[in-house]
Image: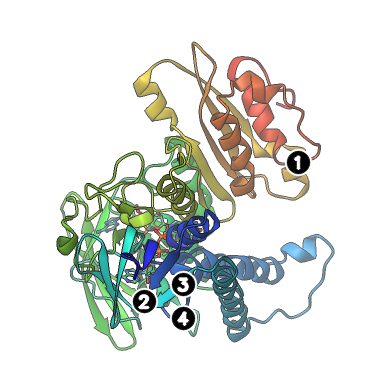
Amino acid sequence: MAEFDFDVLVIGAGPGGYVAAIRAAQLGLKTACAESRETLGGTCLNVGCIPSKALLHASELYEEAAHGTLAKWGVKTGGVELDLDAMHGTRLEAIKGLTGGIEFLFKKNKVEWLKGHAAFTGKDSVKVGDREVRAKNIVIATGSSVTPLPGVEIDHDAIVDSTSALELKKVPGHMVVIGGGVIGLELGSVWRRLGAKVTVVEFLDQILPGMDGEVRKEAARIFKKQGFDIKTGTKVTKAERKGDGVVLTVEPAKGGEATTIEADTVLVSIGRRPNTDGLALDKAGLQTNNRGQVEIDHDFRTKVPGIWAIGDVAPGPMLAHKAEDEGIAVAENIAGLTGIVNHDVIPSVVYTMPEIAGVGLTEEEAKERGEVNVGKFPMMANSRAKTNREPDGFVKVVADAKTDRVLGVHIVASVAGTMIAQAAQAMEFGATSEDIAYTCHAHPTHSEAVKEAAMAVTGKPIHI
Ligand code: FAD
Ligand code: NAI
């Protein structure tokens, strides 16, 4: 009898775990993946990236039809009606198709799916449901879940988290979003477009912490123009159910007089925390750090030989593509190859309209490290954005003043999420702003704004 059941056991089948499992199997390792959810794909495919983007797309189409944007293009739609059930149906179809796709890929690559909750029983053994298995390598990819807010208990009815906010059966009259981060602005956008009044309560002085300062300002201006009521520097201290709705007590973050806000639905979106509950990390000789994460080195090894960690449960941004890239790299490291993720070049995108994207250092971070040159180009002056009636936003390129190497790119534009890929690739190749400025970009595309912003770093763009 073989000493080990598997070469690799991955715990969690999110974008980190399922990618690691498939890559390990592709590399000839006998691989299993434990997942407690009934479907594969983790947070991202089941209750995160995919269903939120389905609703963002659907609500955008609705708003374009209902608010006369399509009519301006000569597309008259007559009476526009919202069929929320159909919208949810399309969301569920997207989830089913993609989670089923991962199941197919597991079968194709001979990854064994161990169904159930996994808990360590030793340094190389894990119990999944009733079955105990031993593996030479164990990858912790258990992801994250919603951070609770004391005093505002989520009941999945009037007080919801991101998962229940995706499933609302009717459009709230007034939705209050606690936390002006990515989830609050994306899901707030969905319900605002469908007719809700949306108030965002943010603890800090500005929304979207971590993003470039000018981007945060521009985003707040645009969201306010769209009808969001944004209350920054404000904290929620209490939530009380009243009838079908909720009464929130809020006060200035720095202290001061308390007031109340009535809401039909309250969305708690103040961040996410790593999932390690019930994993019995102590049986493997592991602990979490003070942020609840499993610490790793550059190769994704924990301090226990043979145990690795990736994705949201490990340090770094909680993003699906970061988890996926780490999934590939950890499998390659386990197989004796060299798996590397450049954590300095991980793009982040907020999928609102316009989209907000960034990669590398913000202008503020770059200036702390040395002298920089900054080039900016407004989308208003980009022919395609102007033609498409998408004038909001800009592209900003931050480059080292001495070497001209691009340190960061920040974009507010309707298709910023797609445009940021070229910036990430350029940075990955160590590009200068001049390299981007002298690269031929197809016309007419939004991406020409990246070229023009790069031209603005040390010289002059043509179209402004
Ligand atoms: P997860 O996807 O969380 O997967 C972990 C899996 O492990 C889960 O399925 C869980 O059931 C399972 N698990 C946990 N513990 C155990 C156990 N003990 N035994 C067995 N199984 C276990 N990121 C983006 O990049 N782009 C987006 O557009 C985006 N949109 C999002 C929208 C929302 C509403 C949310 C909530 C998140 C979004 N994210 C987005 C973040 C993204 O979903 C996560 O960064 C990503 O899913 C992390 O992948 P992961 O593999 O580390 O963990
Ligand atoms: P977040 O960290 O993006 O934003 C949380 C916001 O809540 C911050 O602005 C913070 O200052 C604020 N906050 C914290 N405590 C507060 C309080 N008590 N009262 C008021 N405001 C408070 O977290 P969010 O939006 O919950 O999303 C979690 C993570 O999920 C994101 O950080 C991201 O990693 C991931 N995600 C990514 C998406 C994408 O890539 N498009 C989409 C959705 C989620």
Ligand 1 within 8 angstroms of badge 2 C-beta: yes
Instruction: Using the numbered discs, state the Cα–Cα distance from disc 4 to disc 1 in whole angstroms.
Output: 37 Å
Residue position marked by numbered label 1 in the rendering: 445
Residue position marked by numbered label 3 in the rendering: 112
- Residue at 46% across / 81% down in the picture? 168
Mark 3 Cα shell of 10 Å, populated few (<14), some (14-19), many (≥20) = some
Q: Is residue 158 left or right of residue 17?
A: left
Instruction: Using the numbered discs, state the Cα–Cα distance from disc 1 to disc 2 in whole angstroms.
Output: 44 Å
The amino acid beneath tag 1 is: Thr
Whether residue 189 is visible to the viewer of this picture, yes or no, is: yes
Q: Residue 311's x, y, as percent?
A: 38, 54
- Nearer to us: label 3 or label 1: 3
Q: Residue 436's x, y, as percent?
A: 66, 25
Q: Is residue 47 left or right of residue 135?
A: right
Residue 83's place in the image compared with 460, above or below, is below
Residue position marked by numbered label 2 in the rendering: 36
